[in-house]
Amino acid sequence: MNAQPSTPNPQRLTLRLRSNGPTDLARCNQPVTENQKDREAYLDGTLYRASRIDGVPVVIRARSVATDELAFEVSAAEDSPLPAPEVVQAALKRKFSLDLDLPAFYRFVSRFPQLAPLAARQNGLRPLLKDSLLEALCLAVADQQVNVAFAARLKHRLLESYGRCYHIDGLDLWLFPTIDELAALDPHALCALQFTRNKSSYIVGLARQFLADPNWAIHTGSDDEIVQRLCTLRGVGRWTAEYAAMVGLGLVDTLPAADIALMRMVQQVYDLAERPTDSQVREIGRNWSPWRGLVTFYLWYLEDTKD
């Protein structure tokens, strides 16, 4: 099935929300974005996203009105009514990481000469989370063992073939396929998009696992315990679990130490003669706890935006 352009209905909800510390939407829009169209979705001070809130496709417009306050306009993207305002508010706070205590994080990194510049250079950077853990896992599977450019093509092909596109204010806003849509695919359906047979099978299998067991959406325990549980899923190794836990669940103390970009940035900021191994990154990262994931995110942003 091909993604079809849609027009949002006129139902809208506007609200203002405070963030725990500064928020810079222009910075939030840039890093670890799989889709180039998302990177372009920051226009005249407004950040745009297509999202799902309580299963309802919506279009989000976000604008800063103060250093620590955002104005949101949320409109239903199709015919379904918007969820209750309190549900929308909770979803926005989650997606934009508004409760994340950036002042505490900045105080923490100030203790490390190598990391202290991150706070000033990237002030207000917050992760924009994926709509679901399943989405984060599927995108991480696409990233496995391929270069960044090819992984980006794979992920966009997945969106074009099975996602939805909303044309808003001259922008194309893409929405990830639903769990039902992915679960209904033949296990090797994605091979036509140049996914390997294994990756195609993993993605469809993950969707079916999550559809059959909704408890996978409920996560308790430490960050490390959650990562270990994710690693029991077929096709999910440690890096995939650690990355997905960060961008799908908003965990801030996971460390995807095998990530090549992270290795490069650890080499740079710690002035190492050679690129460290994943074991060496993990050892260095022990000192970053309980903020290992957020340090990683900030280092990724540094890698992504360096000249």
Image (spheres, grey):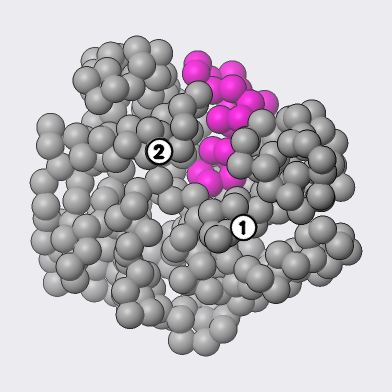
For residue 126, which quarter of the picture? bottom right
Q: Amino acid at mark 1?
A: Leu
Residue 247 in the magenta stretch? The answer is yes
Magenta stretch: helix, strand or loop mostly? helix
For residue 98, which quarter of the picture? bottom right
| Secondary structure category for the residue under label 1 | helix
Q: Amino acid at mark 2?
A: Ala
Residue at image location 61% in from the left, 30% down from the top: 239
How many residues crowd around disc 1 within 10 Å: few (fewer than 14), some, or many (20 or more)? some
Residue at image location 35% in from the left, 69% down from the top: 42
What residue sits right under mark 2 in the picture? 149
Compared with 16, 74 (above or below) is above
Residue 81 drawn at (x, y percent): 20, 61
Residue 197 in the magenta stretch? The answer is no
Magenta range: 227-248
Residue at image location 63% in from the left, 63% down from the top: 100
Residue 302 left/right relative to 107? left
Compared with 298, 107 (above or below) is below
How many residues crowd around disc 2 within 10 Å: few (fewer than 14), some, or many (20 or more)? few
Task: Determine the CA span between mark 2 and mark 1.
Answer: 18 Å
What residue sits right under mark 1 in the picture? 302
